[in-house]
Image (cartoon, rainbow, N blue to C red):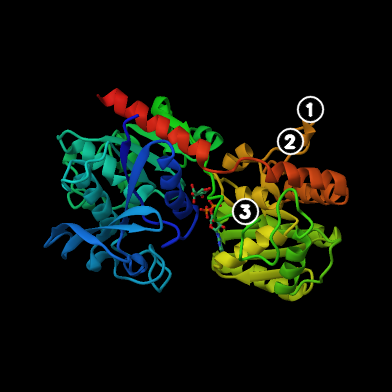
Amino acid sequence: MTPIRVLAVASEVYPIIKTGGLADVVGALPAALKQHGVATRTLVPGYPAVLSALRSAETVLSWPEYYGGPIRVLAAANDGLDLLVLDAPHLYARPGNPYVGPDGRDWPDNGIRFAALSRVAAEIGIGTIPTFLPDIVHAHDWQAGLAPATLHYSGQQRPGTVMTVHNLAYQGQFSPDMLATFGLPPEAYALHGVEYYGAISLLKAGLQFADRITTVSPTYAREIQGDDGGMGLGGLLRERADVLSGILNGIDIAVWNPATDHEIAAQFSAEHLTPRAANKAALQRRFGLDVSSGALLLGVISRLSWQKGLDLLLETVPTLLGEGMQLALLGSGDRDLQDRFAALAQAHPGRIGVEIGYDEALAHLIQAGSDALAVPSRFEPCGLTQLCALRYGAVPVVADVGGLADTVLDFDEATVTSDAATGVKFRPVTAEALAHALRKANLLFNDPVTWRRLQHAGMTTDVSWHNRAGRYAALYRELVAARR
Ligand code: ADP
Ligand code: GLC
């Protein structure tokens, strides 16, 4: 089979720069695609963290002036990733979070920062780097959304374009005055263009003009065509339903492998589950919880935002305590949620432990030591923590939405083939339903044989990228064939 050349475009990539699951996906997909005959190069902004991660780099493109300063594109191999880095100090030489400044607000020039990224991607798409002409430009989220639109309007022979939605809630909206700055022609500012309720949406730009649209689970692909889930773009997504599909995310099963994980207290596997108990004790100590094997220890690893439904978990604390359960939460985000969880931990030492912050190593210990992992999201395009939980034998208790619905098989749903059940799902996404799910999880936990079966089924579920990457490879091939 002829290899397919893909230019992936994204604003984050694991392990170099990450705020959420987008980075995990962009970082892990290329290696998995390689097994399917797809060679990926990934274009990312040259934030300080990215530039300092490069060991050696070759300049493949250099312009003296682009959006207010000189830019270069550097090619570099890094941890198995074939990176193209847009080095533009006037846009990206800002430490810390890729999107927000020290005051916690979005950088005022984010439109320009990511328009530059997307337009350079489009340039590469039409052959500006002579040694690399991609068959496909694959744009991830709004930060890359202008790439398919720019290619559409380029009037040149162009590669196929794919737009992947990781989260429809972030739409990249900017003033209509930016149209020319974004390099778009006046006619692009239209209902069937980039216009969005009197503004420009860079996500809409991608959704409107990409040849194919994907999102990260089949259920989310359906939900976003509805009026609620569509978040203002449902009509467009319904119109483009014939080119829209949902492909589930996987996780990097080398990074997330309880049998070899050095971040945890004791390694274990589906066959050797006993050492897992040492992780629970280590996690309890780390969070100042009473060290007890009998109490169900519920873990949470999450951004603290409305999407994740953790305010509902706050409401269920009386149930949690009444059932004799414990909670270990790691998260950061909304100030209000941070404060409420921190206060809760202070009020219930030994029972509730909270760590506000971002800590990759601790996330591994939580997966290894919790009995169950709660993901009560109001919406969830795919979700990755429940996939890690399955692999680590932490039974997921999840809202029945989006990718959570597609990746967890509920104990009751699975009555016919109950061996296959992997977790507990609840709906509607309310505090009452969550409380009920927690009580149910506790009941199952207190039946060791059943619990062991749930863990085992989860740990032997395929959460890897291999087959899922195959879906992307097939999509790319189909698109290349369609454009011949
Ligand atoms: P989202 O991208 O919406 O935040 P996902 O579940 O897809 O949700 O991905 C979140 C990723 O970020 C996972 O890899 C998870 O382990 C990680 N993560 C989230 N919050 C933290 C945190 N506070 N510390 C460490 N890792 C975190
Ligand atoms: C987004 C979504 C999450 C998804 C991730 C990677 O951040 O919120 O559900 O898993 O992207 O696709």
The residue indicated by pointer 3 is 309
**Looking at the picture, which amino acid does disc 3 mark?**
Gly
Label 1: few (<14), some (14–19) or many (≥20) C-alpha neighbours in 10 Å: few
* Quadrant of the image occupied by residue 401: top right
Report the side of 157 relative to 79 (left or right): left
Q: Quadrant of the C terminus?
A: top left
Residue 296 at x, y = what percent?
80, 58
Q: Nearer the viewer, mark 2 or mark 3?
A: 2
Q: Nearer the viewer, mark 3 or mark 1?
A: 1
Mark 2, ligand 2, within 8 Å: the answer is no
Residue in the foreground of this view, choosing between 145 and 131 = 131
Residue in the foreground of this view, choosing between 386 and 256 = 256
Q: Earlier in the sequence, mark 2 or mark 3?
A: 3
Residue 119 at x, y = what percent?
22, 49
**Looking at the picture, which amino acid does disc 2 mark?**
Ala
Residue 474 at x, y = what percent?
41, 30
User: Disc 2 versus disc 3: distance between alpha carbons?
Assistant: 27 Å
Question: Which element is circle 1 on?
Answer: loop
Residues at circles 1 and 2 in contact by the CB criterion of under 8 Å:
no
Report the side of 23 relative to 458 (left or right): left
